[in-house]
Image (tube, rainbow, N blue to C red):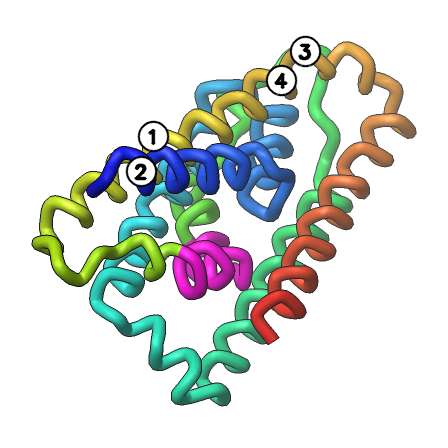
Amino acid sequence: MELELWLSLVLLFFTGGLTPGPAVMLVLASSFRYGFKPALLPAFGVASANVLWLCIAASGTAVLFEIYPKATLGLKILGILVLVWMAISVMIGPLPGLEPDPDDAPKRSRLYAKGFLLQITSPMPLVYFGMLLPLYFQTQLPLAPQFLIMLVTVTVLELFGLSVYAYAAQSIRRYLQNPQTGRMFNVLIGVVMISSGFFAVLSTA
């Protein structure tokens, strides 16, 4: 992969990783309630789902989204339903105490599965992996090295962006100890999750 093309890819996923979306909001809410380390589990779930999305982009399966619009619509509807479910669980869920309690967190597998399920069904990856990422593959070059470079690049940038938000949640935690303020913060997270999902649906219409 040419250096200029790789730098363009880095810029795309660096800004994407720091743009508030469903995955960011899930990690932010998890860190706010359970602490930094437990919040990394859904982040790893998101990164794992990205591997499947990358395989779709590399294999050319993304073209099927255009050939079979009904299947794409079904995926979008499923993604919105998952987003709404997770957003509502954040909005009405219990507020954290004065300090994050890792012992209060669900099983590790459940936190990981939340991140994986959200990312694999979310309409947002359709924008990056279904529409944009296939443009970065150079057909005249071997596919395997390009895939490996993209896999490492996307994974590192995704985890970096999510880690930044998970750490930032610890900094703002002390400002949200008032129950009313904390509830408003959770509602805001839920609204952003749902709004970003609908934005992605409209972007891929």
What is the quadrant of the C terminus in the image?
A: bottom right
* Amino acid beneath label 4: Ala
Label 3 vs 2, first from the N-terminus? 2
Q: Which residue is mark 3?
A: 171
Q: Which residue is mark 1?
A: 156
**For residue 55, above or below residue 92:** below
Tell me the distance, in whole angstroms, between the alpha carbons under discs 3 and 1. 23 Å
Q: Position of residue 12 (x, y in %)?
A: 47, 41
Q: Are marks 4 and 3 in contact (CB under 8 Å)?
A: yes
Q: Which residue is mark 4?
A: 168
Q: Are marks 1 and 2 in contact (CB under 8 Å)?
A: no
* Amino acid beneath label 2: Trp
For numbered disc 2, what is the local secondary structure? Answer: helix
Tell me the distance, in whole angstroms, between the alpha carbons under discs 4 and 1. 18 Å
Choose between 140 and 81: the one closer to the eye. Answer: 140
Could you tell me which residue is drawn at 56 percent across and 33 percent down?
18
Label 4 vs 1, first from the N-terminus? 1
Q: Position of residue 181 (x, y in %)?
A: 88, 26
For numbered disc 3, what is the local secondary structure? Answer: helix
For numbered disc 4, what is the local secondary structure? Answer: helix
Label 4 vs 2, first from the N-terminus? 2
Tell me the distance, in whole angstroms, between the alpha carbons under discs 4 and 2. 28 Å
Could you tell me which residue is drawn at 47 percent across and 63 percent down?
126
